[in-house]
């Protein structure tokens, strides 16, 4: 287990559409904490006290497999009543909890290490406010539904809420023994502990009442929770190396992806992040699937199938939907159900649709799974038709966005803050807006459809090839800033260039739009001190208008953004830069307990100082966890061709201080092999193991 003793730290657990955020003691007390199910907080207070005060924290941790939260606590001095008090530090309390079946199970173990009996008053303060996730994030509502109860009995408390949407939501907090005292929203147990004695109390929280908590229920459900997590973690290839800390980062990233991935009817799907985005997002899932495609193509298949199933079929300004468009976000809370917000099934993202097509093409190249892509072909055609309609309506032929409803997102690229698209003088851009990286995604989508069209529609293939070439020429003409040798951020509704250097241009390298000479110029700037902090690439270059290293999108470092840039740098032949970015990210991860946050502040690295955390970053976040694997792939120069049963390795480099890396159980067609990289005499060699019949071809270029 990896431990931490910071009392202000928060710890998260997730299972399906439920997640729990609590403090280091295990209590739910702060405004942003709670137990959430389907975007509704079903328990807003769950606080364990010893008498009238919180226990003293010794340590707390979540196990490396992300299943079990464990807090070790002790008592402050308890007043001596009938000579049965306890001096400080003689009672050891362990809280162990996990989620299973969208239900919380907890075991509280109390041990008396004193030499006389002690009476231990365990008091629980409870509440359930049933607020929507968007209320927790700060949205204000004109009206709310009606709270019901609470009701208490000998085993715990039941809470209820009748929403304005007509849905009655409930939650129960149950204990394994009757309490000594019940007060409004408070239950107290008194444990009498002989010297050396140990007592256990079991708790369960869920939307429905079930059997009374017990040791057997706890053990059975814990076994199920671990088994389900092991099954998710075993999917796809895994990484090991000669570096113990590097391996720890790889394992933690893999565990975080397993934690965030839910098994849906369409297959595995990575939810975006906890606490704010524990739900299916389109863009986030597509990029996460791209990051891990070389290791786990099954995740990409699940993402593609889910997004195809939820593709828009009709126009809706409120949802920002149009036929063929791929969803941005889906929510299940009361506010979305009532359409107080459009996020029940929302399509306000300009980039998810072309990224969806690009992922389908990458998936086919990686796996050779023609059957799945054939099944997706109608959805891919509809998505391409939406892209072409938008481009045809723009006088420049660009893929643009302008929100259809004032309730939706003003900015609809991955940097969707209200202030993230601006001119060189700091003025905010007015729409319709054409983001530079989105043109790269559209270019990749057109090239993908041309490639797929060769199988099913050769005339359309020629059409998409021509459109891709035209788009590339247009971007080169309208976005390239010859005076600074870089691409501008966007074009506004008047056709004026937002002449700002941002990381967005780095995505063009990943998706192949930038010509070689332009790509090298962009690469040089991305690795300059204006962008590269030593930990990662800033979203906005230092010195530009609105640059702020502690902003959300205007100067911070996002690990997934750095990884996309690194992959593009490697594809452009600047593999050494990708290796530097991998090293910076790894060393940042060491300071973040091996768990990359959604983002962190964009201050320059200084000797002996850690990276500066962003205070409300999601942790864990799917595409932050996946960034580790995209960075490693960029360094190793690996591409897998499932149809040809071949692995291509181009100019592999290993991270600094790592002598060998093994990718275990790489799926190549129907085969599974181990791919080994080893540093020998200043060169990195690659070879395949566990392929006795030689069915997999390894092609190495240096």
Image (spheres, grey):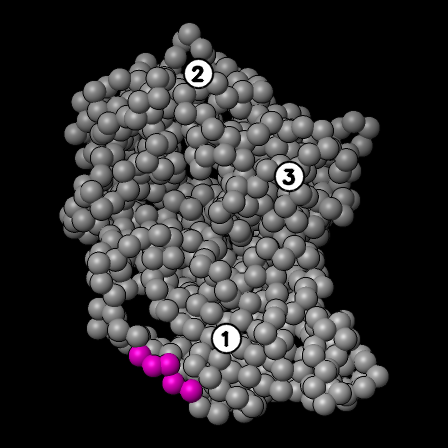
* Residue extent of the magenta highlight: 148-152
Q: Quadrant of residue 11?
A: bottom right
Q: CA distance from mark 2 to mark 1?
A: 58 Å
Name the element at disc 2.
Answer: strand
Which label's residue is closer to the chain start, 2 or 3? Answer: 2
Which label's residue is closer to the chain start, 3 or 1? Answer: 1
Query: Would you call the spot at circle 2 few (<14 residues within 10 Å), some (14-19), or many (20 or more)?
Result: many
Residue sitting at x 75%, y 79%: 86
Residue sitting at x 50%, y 64%: 29
Q: Nearer the viewer, residue 94 or 287?
A: 94
| Residue behind mark 2 | 486
Query: Relative to 317, does residue 77 appear above or below in the rendering?
Result: below
Q: Nearer the viewer, mark 2 or mark 1?
A: 1
Q: Nearer the viewer, mark 3 or mark 1?
A: 1
58 lies left or right of 114: left
| Residue behind mark 1 | 125
Residue 198, image x, y percentages: 73, 85
Quadrant occupied by the N terminus: bottom right
């Amino acid at each position: 287990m990896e431990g931490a003793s910071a009392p202000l730290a928060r710890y998260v657990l997730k299972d399906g559409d439920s997640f729990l955020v609590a403090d280091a003691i295990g209590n739910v007390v702060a405004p942003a904490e709670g137990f959430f199910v389907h975007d509704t907080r079903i328990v807003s207070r769950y606080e364990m006290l010893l008498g009238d005060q919180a226990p003293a924290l010794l340590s707390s941790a979540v196990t490396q497999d992300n299943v079990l939260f464990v807090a070790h606590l002790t008592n402050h001095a308890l007043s001596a009543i009938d000579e049965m008090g306890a001096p400080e530090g003689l009672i050891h309390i362990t809280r162990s909890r996990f989620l299973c079946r969208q239900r919380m199970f907890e075991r509280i173990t109390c041990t008396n290490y004193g030499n006389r009996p002690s009476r231990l008053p365990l008091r629980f303060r409870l509440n359930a406010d049933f607020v929507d996730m968007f209320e927790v994030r700060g949205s204000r509502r004109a009206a709310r539904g009606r709270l019901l109860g609470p009701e208490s009995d000998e085993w715990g408390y039941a809470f209820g809420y009748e929403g304005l949407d007509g849905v009655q939501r409930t939650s129960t907090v149950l204990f394994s023994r009757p309490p000594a005292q019940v007060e409004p929203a408070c239950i107290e147990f008194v444990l009498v502990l002989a010297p050396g004695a140990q007592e256990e109390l079991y708790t369960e929280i869920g939307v429905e009442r079930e059997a009374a908590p017990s040791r057997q229920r706890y053990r059975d459900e814990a076994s199920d929770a671990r088994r389900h997590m092991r099954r998710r973690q075993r999917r796809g290839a895994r990484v090991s190396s000669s570096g113990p800390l590097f391996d720890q980062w790889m394992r933690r990233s893999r565990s975080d992806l397993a934690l965030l991935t839910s098994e849906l009817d369409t297959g595995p799907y990575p939810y975006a992040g906890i606490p704010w985005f524990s739900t299916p997002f389109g863009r986030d899932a597509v990029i996460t699937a791209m990051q891990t495609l070389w290791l786990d193509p099954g995740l990409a298949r699940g993402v593609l199938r889910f997004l195809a199933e939820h593709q828009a079929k009709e126009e809706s300004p409120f949802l920002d939907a149009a036929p063929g468009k791929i969803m941005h976000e889906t929510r299940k809370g009361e506010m979305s159900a009532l359409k107080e917000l459009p996020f029940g099934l929302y399509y306000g993202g300009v980039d998810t649709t072309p990224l969806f097509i690009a992922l389908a093409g990458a998936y086919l190249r990686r796996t050779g799974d023609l059957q799945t892509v054939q099944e997706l072909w109608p959805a891919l055609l509809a998505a391409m038709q939406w892209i072409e309609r938008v481009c045809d309506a723009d006088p420049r032929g660009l893929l643009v966005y302008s929100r259809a409803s004032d309730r939706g997102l003003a900015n609809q690229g991955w940097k969707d803050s209200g202030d993230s698209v601006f001119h060189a003088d700091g003025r905010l851009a007015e729409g319709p807006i054409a983001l530079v990286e989105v043109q790269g995604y559209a270019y990749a989508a057109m090239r993908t459809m041309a490639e797929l069209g060769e199988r099913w529609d050769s005339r359309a293939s020629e059409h998409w090839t021509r459109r891709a070439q035209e788009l590339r020429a247009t971007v080169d003409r309208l976005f390239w800033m010859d005076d600074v040798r870089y691409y501008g951020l966007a074009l506004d509704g008047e056709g004026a260039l937002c002449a700002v250097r941002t990381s967005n241009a780095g995505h063009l390298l990943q998706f192949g739009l930038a010509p070689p000479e332009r790509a090298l110029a962009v690469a040089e700037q991305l690795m300059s001190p204006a962008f590269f902090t030593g930990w990662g690439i800033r979203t906005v270059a230092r010195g530009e208008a609105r640059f702020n290293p502690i902003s959300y999108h205007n100067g911070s470092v996002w690990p997934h953004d750095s990884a996309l840039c690194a992959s593009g740098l490697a594809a452009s032949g600047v593999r050494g830069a990708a290796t530097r970015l991998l090293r910076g990210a790894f060393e940042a991860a060491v300071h973040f307990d091996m768990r990359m946050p959604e983002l962190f502040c964009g201050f320059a690295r200084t000797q002996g100082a850690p990276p500066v955390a962003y205070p409300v970053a999601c942790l864990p976040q799917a595409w932050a966890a996946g960034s580790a694997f995209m960075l490693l792939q960029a360094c190793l120069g690996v591409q897998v061709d499932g149809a040809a049963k071949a692995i291509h390795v181009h100019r592999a480099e290993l991270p600094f201080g790592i002598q060998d890396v093994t990718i275990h159980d790489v799926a190549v067609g129907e085969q599974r092999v181990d791919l080994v990289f080893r540093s020998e005499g200043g060169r990195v060699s690659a070879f395949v193991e566990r392929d006795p019949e030689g069915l997999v071809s390894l092609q190495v270029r240096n």
